[in-house]
């Protein structure tokens, strides 16, 4: 049996793309791939797995260009040394505990609502999303998707996402359906509750193997999971024969680190680094560090461009990720129509796979700046932009949710969640979102030991 993302022909194909992006000449490997794919189309693809594996191993062993190794370090000490500045003197958190809870709950709810909005149409190009929405008069997007009023031939042409897409339509929503974007947030809460703030990458690996079903992870995560089962420990688990190591899978795990490090983006970025290096390298790691820092800073800073810069302050300034985000910041986003902004993003980043870190981070940053703290506008912009719609809606919604707080989030986006999340993660199915927020604030006290929880009133209200 050939398992998706563990298929060596597939991995060899994407390793070629990855190494090209890293600056390596892969002309010979492209020819080799073409010959394998041509033969595999004519015969059983399974018999060519060994040949593809050998070619993948050979390509993976090639050294990285010197400039890449210099500009994109992997160890936390080297990353910090490379940064343009340090925010170690960032002001101490000044929120009262009830305000912190409101912001944390806002992050959880904001993430769930944004994820749910993008879930039915994940993977579809922005032109398809617009076609679907225009067919029933729902463009521009301003509510959860509905198939009511959509022509049957269009629904057959573009079926809803197989993994609970139908349950994510406005007329069918009962709660937040299972999604890896929320599974990882809950899993990271479990990691801090179990191992404490001194958790290691090895602790992350152990938690994954104990709590997370392997078929609930994809791309880089599935390769890393398989590596762990074969005795390969972090950080090698994220590097060995893993062509998806710079895709979005780590970036979507950033939120919990920001929630528990409110007002301390440097600590949030460090937590994200410990997590990301188990499955990713370079760009993949920086994406998680970047958004974790933004979420931590969002508790005390609300200007979007300042927040984006605070995220950039945590990662190497000469990295491909930093350069891409700075390119986004050069766009006059606030004064341009959203579709014009997205056109520019597709011109610059449209060559990346739809679940790569860089293009999705760029789109999320632009949606945050254009939305200017408006929850609905932000998540709708993120989703209308296409690519990894549920991930981008979730990340953007989480950040604005922190800023707005649960009490200020629009009811039409929050009420359908019914304060519940489904999950295949051990011990988390049918969790109350309010309970998760309370547990998050409690864990944050272990991270910020100078704070106490006695005055925090437990409530299911939001």
Image (cartoon, rainbow, N blue to C red):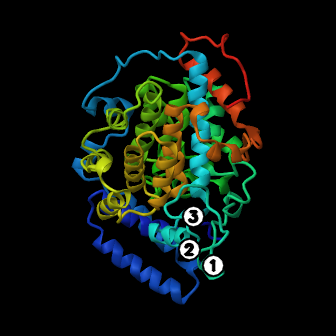
In the rendered image, is residue 265 in sight?
A: yes
Residue at (45% x, 41% y) in the render: 288
What number is the disc on residue 456? none
Q: Which of pointers 3 and 1 lies earlier in the amino acid sequence?
A: 3
Q: Which residue is mark 1?
A: 151
* Up/down of 12 relative to 77, above or below: below
Q: Quadrant of the N terminus?
A: bottom right
Closer to us: 265 or 77: 265
Q: Which mark is residue 135?
A: 2
The front one of 119 and 14 is: 119
35 and 263: which one is in front?
A: 263
Dot 1: element:
loop
Q: Is residue 459 above or below residue 393?
A: above
Mark before the other along the chain sequence, 3 or 2: 3
Q: Which mark's residue is nearer the viewer, 3 or 2?
A: 2
Q: Please give the residue where the numbered disc 3 appears in the rendered image.
A: 121
Q: Is residue 307 above or below residue 455?
A: below
Circle 1 Cα neighbour tier, 10 Å, few/some/many (<14 / 14–19 / ≥20): few
Image marks 1 and 2: residues in contact by CB distance under 8 Å: yes
Q: CA distance from mark 1 to mark 2?
A: 7 Å
Q: Secondary structure at mark 2?
A: helix
Q: Residue at x 26, y 59 (%)?
A: 23
Q: Secondary structure at mark 3?
A: helix
């Amino acid at each position: 049996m050939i398992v998706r993302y563990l298929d060596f022909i597939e991995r060899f194909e994407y390793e070629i793309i990855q190494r090209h992006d890293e600056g390596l000449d892969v002309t010979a490997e492209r020819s080799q791939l073409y010959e394998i794919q041509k033969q595999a189309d004519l015969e059983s693809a399974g018999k060519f797995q060994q040949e593809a594996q050998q070619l993948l191993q050979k390509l993976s062993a090639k050294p990285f260009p010197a400039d890449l190794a210099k500009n994109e370090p992997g160890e936390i000490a080297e990353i910090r040394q490379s940064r343009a500045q340090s925010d170690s003197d960032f002001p101490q958190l000044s929120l009262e505990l009830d305000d912190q809870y409101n912001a944390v709950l806002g992050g959880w709810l904001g993430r769930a609502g944004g994820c749910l909005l993008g879930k039915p149409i994940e993977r579809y190009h922005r032109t398809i999303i617009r076609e679907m929405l225009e067919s029933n008069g729902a463009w521009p997007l301003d509510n959860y998707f509905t198939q009511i009023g959509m022509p049957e031939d269009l629904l057959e042409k573009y079926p809803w996402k197989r993994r609970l897409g139908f349950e994510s339509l406005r007329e069918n929503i009962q709660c937040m359906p299972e999604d890896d974007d929320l599974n990882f947030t809950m899993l990271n809460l479990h990691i801090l509750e179990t191992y404490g703030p001194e958790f290691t990458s090895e602790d992350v690996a152990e938690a994954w193997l104990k709590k997370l079903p392997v078929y609930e992870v994809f791309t880089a995560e599935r390769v890393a999971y398989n590596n762990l089962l074969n005795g390969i420990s972090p950080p090698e688990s994220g590097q060995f024969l893993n062509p998806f190591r710079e895709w979005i899978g780590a970036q979507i795990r950033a939120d919990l680190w920001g929630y528990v490090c409110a007002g301390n983006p440097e600590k949030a970025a460090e937590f994200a680094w410990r997590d990301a290096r188990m499955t990713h390298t370079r760009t993949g790691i920086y994406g998680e560090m970047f958004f974790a820092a933004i979420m931590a800073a969002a508790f005390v800073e609300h200007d979007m461009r300042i927040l984006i810069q605070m995220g950039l302050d945590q990662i190497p300034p000469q990295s491909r990720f930093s350069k891409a985000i700075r390119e986004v910041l050069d766009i006059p986003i606030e004064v341009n129509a959203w579709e014009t902004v997205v056109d520019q993003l597709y011109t610059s980043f449209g060559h990346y796979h739809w679940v790569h870190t860089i293009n999705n981070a760029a789109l999320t940053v632009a949606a945050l700046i254009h939305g200017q703290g408006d929850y609905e506008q932000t998540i709708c912009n993120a989703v209308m932009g296409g690519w990894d719609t549920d991930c981008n809606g979730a990340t953007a919604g989480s950040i604005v949710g922190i800023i707005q707080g649960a009490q200020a989030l629009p009811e039409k986006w929050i009420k359908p969640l019914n304060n519940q999340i489904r999950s295949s993660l051990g011990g988390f199915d049918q969790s109350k979102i309010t309970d998760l927020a309370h547990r998050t604030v409690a864990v944050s006290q272990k991270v910020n030991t100078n704070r106490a929880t006695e005055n925090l009133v437990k409530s299911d209200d939001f």
